[in-house]
């Protein structure tokens, strides 16, 4: 089953082309990376999936449903900016989150919180950047969504916390869903990816399974990345 | 967590690690392997990758699945012996290849091994 299908998707901001003719299909039960340098269109594509903006042309569906209010239930999104009210405690923030999403799974959230070594009665204000990132990730992963979209989940996080975050992603990954991750820390995410799309100036320049990329080209994704984006 | 090397598929590297554990006797015939999820979490890799590890181990006859219970290491001395000789062969080949690249001849290669082994032995006596 296809969780996400994007056909010939283009997005222009006036005369600036952000994405052109993107074809992406994500199968169920995969972890897929969307990799590219700053400004290559990663976040634009994620905004399209979430329905925050509309494509200039082309079509995107999640589980064969056109992007719209009905797909909000299917997609769980981790934005790369902070969105939690800092006067709330973690518990209050989670309760607020739960009101918005009916697939919120409280048991899983508490488990993830534990795993991240956070306690529910701390105020969001007193959390460090990395801790906020972990909290936001725990919220995103606590939904039983079909498509989980993580925008730069490792940004600004120390190496130990990175391992925790990767562990949390692996731990909560279910075969019923698909995870789409954007990152420019290729080395870090490489080991959890099934497939990778390389995005350059709004176009897909390379797409394959990570095993194929490694064995056919004899290079790690990181090396390939440097090669593709060097010039 | 092991450091994955750059250019071989990750599932093959985990397969190698498990084989090495069998040869070293850390895993024995009849032992149950950890579940897909446990391995995925400890190596920080995708569960699909671990699934491929199991498929590869089964294909090579190193492990066998028991429906509903888990995956087990194949019992019997032959398995270990076979693994030992193929792994030893592989590592020696790698060494020889690298030495040849440096322009060493067969005699020099053998000399080198002997010297290192000798040094190791002396170190052991001292310590």
Image (cartoon, rainbow, N blue to C red):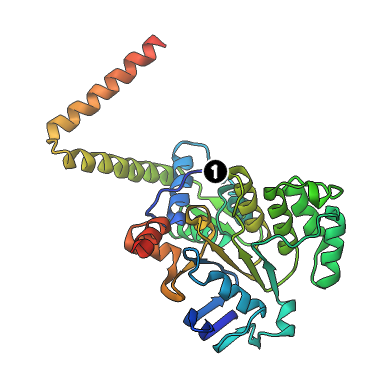
Q: Outermost residue, top direction? A: B126
Vertical arrangement, residue B44 with respect to residue A64, above or below = above
Quarter of the image where one finds residue B9? bottom left
Q: Is residue A100 left or right of residue B10?
A: right
Dividing the image into 4 quarters, which one contains the C terminus of chain A? bottom left
Between residue A208 and residue A99, name the one nearer to us. Answer: A99
Instruction: Specify whether residue A144 is in view.
Output: yes
Q: Is residue A94 left or right of residue A156?
A: right
Vertical arrangement, residue A66 with respect to residue B33, above or below = below
Which residue has dot 1 on it?
B1
Quarter of the image where one finds residue A155? bottom right
Between residue A6 and residue A105, name the one nearer to us. Answer: A6
Residue A18: x and y, percent? 50, 77
Query: Helix, strand or loop at disc 1?
Result: loop
Residue B123: x and y, percent? 36, 15
Residue A132: x and y, percent? 72, 52
Between residue A124 and residue B67, name the one nearer to us. Answer: A124
Circle 1 chain: B
Instruction: Specify whether residue A176 is in view.
Output: no
Dividing the image into 4 quarters, which one contains the N terminus of chain A? bottom right
Label 1 CA crowd tier, 10 Å (few <14, some 14–19, many 20+) = few
Residue A55: x and y, percent? 58, 85
Q: Outermost residue, front direction? A: A14
Between residue A18 and residue A139, name the one nearer to us. Answer: A18
Residue drawn at (51%, 55%) of the image: A185
Quarter of the image where one finds residue A175? bottom right
């Amino acid at each position: 089953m296809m969780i996400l299908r994007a056909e010939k998707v283009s997005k222009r901001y006036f005369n600036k082309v952000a994405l052109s003719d993107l074809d992406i299909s994500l199968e169920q039960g995969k972890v897929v990376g969307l990799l590219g340098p700053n400004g290559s269109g990663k976040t634009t594509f994620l905004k399209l999936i979430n329905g925050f903006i509309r494509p200039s042309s082309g079509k995107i569906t999640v589980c064969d449903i056109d992007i719209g209010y009905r797909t909000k239930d299917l997609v769980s999104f981790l934005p790369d900016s902070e969105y939690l009210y800092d006067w709330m405690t973690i518990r209050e923030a989670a309760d607020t989150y739960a009101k918005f999403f009916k697939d919120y799974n409280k048991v899983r959230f508490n488990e993830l919180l534990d795993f991240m070594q956070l306690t529910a009665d701390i105020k969001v204000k007193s959390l460090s950047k990395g801790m906020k990132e972990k909290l936001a990730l725990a919220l995103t992963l606590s939904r039983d969504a079909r498509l989980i979209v993580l925008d730069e989940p490792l940004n600004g996080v120390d190496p130990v916390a990175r391992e925790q975050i990767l562990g949390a992603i692996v731990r909560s990954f279910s075969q019923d869903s698909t995870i789409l991750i954007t990152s420019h820390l290729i080395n870090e995410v490489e080991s959890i990816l099934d497939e990778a799309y390389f995005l350059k100036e709004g176009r897909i320049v390379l797409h394959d399974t990570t095993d194929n990329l490694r064995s056919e080209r004899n290079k790690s994704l990181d090396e390939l990345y440097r090669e593709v984006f060097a010039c | 967590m092991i450091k994955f090397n750059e250019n071989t598929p990750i599932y093959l590297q985990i397969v190698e690690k498990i084989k090495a554990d069998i040869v070293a006797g850390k895993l024995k015939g009849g032992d149950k392997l950890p579940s897909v999820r446990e391995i995925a979490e400890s190596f920080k890799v995708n569960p699909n990758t671990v699934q491929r590890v199991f498929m590869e181990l089964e294909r090579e006859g190193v492990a066998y699945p028991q429906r509903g219970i888990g995956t087990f290491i194949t019992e019997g001395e032959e398995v270990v012996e076979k693994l030992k000789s193929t792994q030893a062969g592989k590592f020696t080949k790698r060494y020889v290849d690298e030495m040849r690249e440096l322009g060493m001849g067969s005699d020099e290669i053998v000399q080198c091994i002997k010297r290192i082994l000798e040094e190791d032995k002396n170190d052991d006596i001292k310590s």
